[in-house]
Image: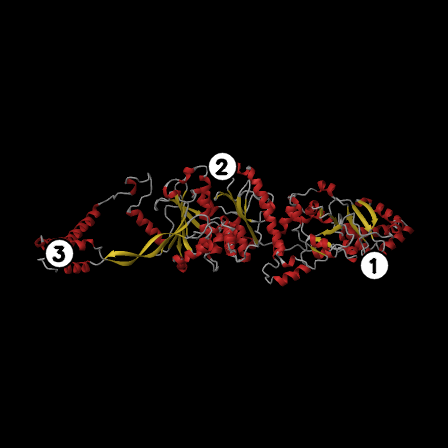
Amino acid sequence: MRKWTIPSALLLLCLLFLLPDQGRKLHANAEANSEELVDPPKVEEKIGAVPNGLSTDSDVAKREAESISKRSLRSNAEKFEFQAEVSRLMDIIINSLYSNKDIFLRELISNASDALDKIRFLSLTDKEILGEGDSSKLEIQIKLDKEKKILSIRDRGIGMTKEDLIKNLGTIAKSGTSAFVEKMQTSGDLNLIGQFGVGFYSVYLVADYVEVISKHNDDKQYVWESKADGAFAISEDVWNEPLGRGTEIRLHLRDEAGEYLEESKLKELVKKYSEFINFPIYMWASKEVEKEVPADEDEAEEETSESSSSDEGEEEDAEKGEDEEAEKKPKTKKLKETIHEWELLNDVKAVWLRNPKEVTDEEYIKFYHSLAKDFSDEKPLAWSHFTAEGDVEFKAILFVPPKAPHDLYESYYNANKSNFKLYVRRVFISDEFDELLPKYLNFLKGLVDSDTLPLNVSREMLQQHSSLKTIKKKLVRKALDMIRRIAEEDPDELNVKDKKEVEKSDEDDTKKGQYTKFWNEFGKSIKLGIIEDATNRNRLAKLLRFESTKSDGKLASLDQYISRMKPGQKDIFYITGTSKEQLEKSPFLERLTKKNYEVIFFTDPVDEYLMQYLMEYEGKKFQNVSKEGLKIGKDSKDKDLKESFKDLTKWWKDALASDNVDDVKISNRLADTPCVVVTSKYGWSANMERIMQSQTLSDASKQAYMRGKRVLEVNPRHPIIKELRERVAKDPEDANVKQTAQLIYQTALMESGFMLPDPKDFASHIYSSVKSSLNISPEATVEEEDDTEEPEPETETKDESSIYKQEDDSTEPSDLKDEL
């Protein structure tokens, strides 16, 4: 047996040397024969291929490589021009010196998440829409090609049809495009692009050529491509492998954007911006692993020769040695090898599902930025994270943004938009449910996740579900409590006594001035809530803030006003107008200020509507100091004054009969002004009348019944009124006295905030008064100018006109087009 071992080994070695030569000959023959093949087999000819699917033959691969290398639009593609606003937006982005180019990745991931949300929502009623295999996996994939400088982001979302690609990525600009362009020109902050719905175009911060490959269940697979040169092209995709469903965006990066080809950079960006996306984000990442491999053959042969050098005569010992050799494990060594695999980047559990005590402030702030697509440095003013139990169980997070959206109050009652997301058992349903929060709280951002609501019903049926009313009631209460806490924790909102205690116990000034900031951004929403929400009107009234005659330029609350009320004061005094500066000089405040009464200033147009609904607070009624019914104590001389001025008030009332003056009375609100015009208690004030007249579609004939009855109140202590009384007593029919009385009334009307019905008549009375003061005769007339005719200007000569005509003819249509 031993004798045949060495010859057998030598024979095997000879065979091993011969085999590589035969392999090289076979390979050469295969290359020669390959030149004769005219039509190599394609994928669709193979078993299991998709009918009419995409081919992957050598010609297709070659065409694709050429297209990528040239970065030029495909020749057979259908060409389109970008809509003007989109082109303008892209010019701004491409030429931008904006340093933070990282935002492009978060915008693409956000769009991918939205597409996945849509397909998951549709799958609730049609499970087959997801398909089978990989297509049913709702995920986002990021892949790098460093050699070709391509970054790919793929999702298995709803995908886009050809029409969707045209509409969403080029020709029809959304309203947000214009708004964002205007915002960019004023602030230059490109970071807000996602809030305007045009985040896709941020790709041109880093790429000079972009491909969007998309497959919708209702259409073929198409490729959208653009070099950001004012045009884009769309063609049926016969280059790439089938997506099944979804969208893949390929960014051909600029040379200066090479940092985005580093895995570490992309991981950092996903961690920073997209950590709380509700779908898994995978990256095709490389990593080094240790792998055990067999030891080299030379080492194995040496061991074999050493083991075979034992004495041939001792056969039993040799057989035992061979058995032990077989039982020994083969010798191996460890080598480092680079492998590629899909690595999950966002493995953080949904914040709203965690215990609020376990979530840090930094996590809440990061989640808000992700949810609101607001990546500015400002953090939310407040948040509330809670779980509701009982008949309806749900988890919710509410945020108060640091700034109001640019279009918060545009089309307030017509717009059907919300910043609140509805989830049912962790499945995103919609962000357009107005039933979750009332309109006046639509500035809040957040989400609610309910286990009670049904999952597989239509959106219309879900809107009618009885549980929504319960959820809405609890959300409103929590939202108002959250806003109230902002005020309670703000040191500026406390009284002087409380301020001292806070300063001793708390030195943190981070919450100082927070409620003032909130009020400046969202105060109008609180006022609209008082108008619309009768149930929570008193709770909202506690959040109301205003300036007053005693607030020293700071905001005050109704509770602070009541604490400063004079003994015996039953009403809360206020006045409405266009500005605080104007109201401070108003004649209606003269006596109130002298008697040390506090008066609230309402300068927002919505305040007029507000005070029609807010009739009282904590048992105190509101009194507009520019209307009838003002009571400021009692004066023992009032009766005597009324009697002594009875003849004047009666005569003046008759003289103003044509001006719709309802009455002339003695005033208890004036100190230094001769007279003012007030309105009836339930009619429009002068400010409200002006607001209504400014309405675009106002009808003056229909507004007449809402105008308050005008009452002229005179100051019996003023020398002008005293002198007028004496003149009337002497000669009631004196034309000069009547004209003076008319002029005084018109002046009071204007000073009280009303618009003059006949400004020309008022002006003529003023000029007459000026003439009288200058001792100019009333019959003096204006000197007439000479009637001499001026020579007509010379007309254009024939030659000049012909020259102009030639210039007009030489103007090319393209030049005119550029000018337009």
Could you say whether the residue bearing mark 2 is in a helix, strand or loop?
loop
The residue pinned by badge 2 equals: 457
Indicate the position of residue 562 as horizontal and vertical percent values: 72, 53
Indicate the position of residue 492 as horizontal and vertical percent values: 64, 59
Measured in 3D between alpha carbons, the distance from the residue under mark 1 to the one under mark 3, in whole angstroms, is 144 Å
Residue at the image position 74 percent from the left and 41 percent from the top = 705
Q: What amino acid is at disc 3?
A: Ala
The residue pinned by badge 1 equals: 773
Q: Residues within 10 Å of mark 3 (few under 14, many from 20)?
A: some
Q: Nearer the viewer, residue 640 or 38?
A: 640
Q: Nearer the viewer, residue 117 or 42?
A: 117
Nearest to N terminus: mark 1 or mark 2: 2
The residue pinned by badge 3 equals: 318
Nearest to N terminus: mark 2 or mark 3: 3
Circles 1 and 2, Cβ within 8 Å, touching? The answer is no
Residue at the image position 53 percent from the left and 38 percent from the top = 462
Q: Is residue 720 left or right of residue 585?
A: right
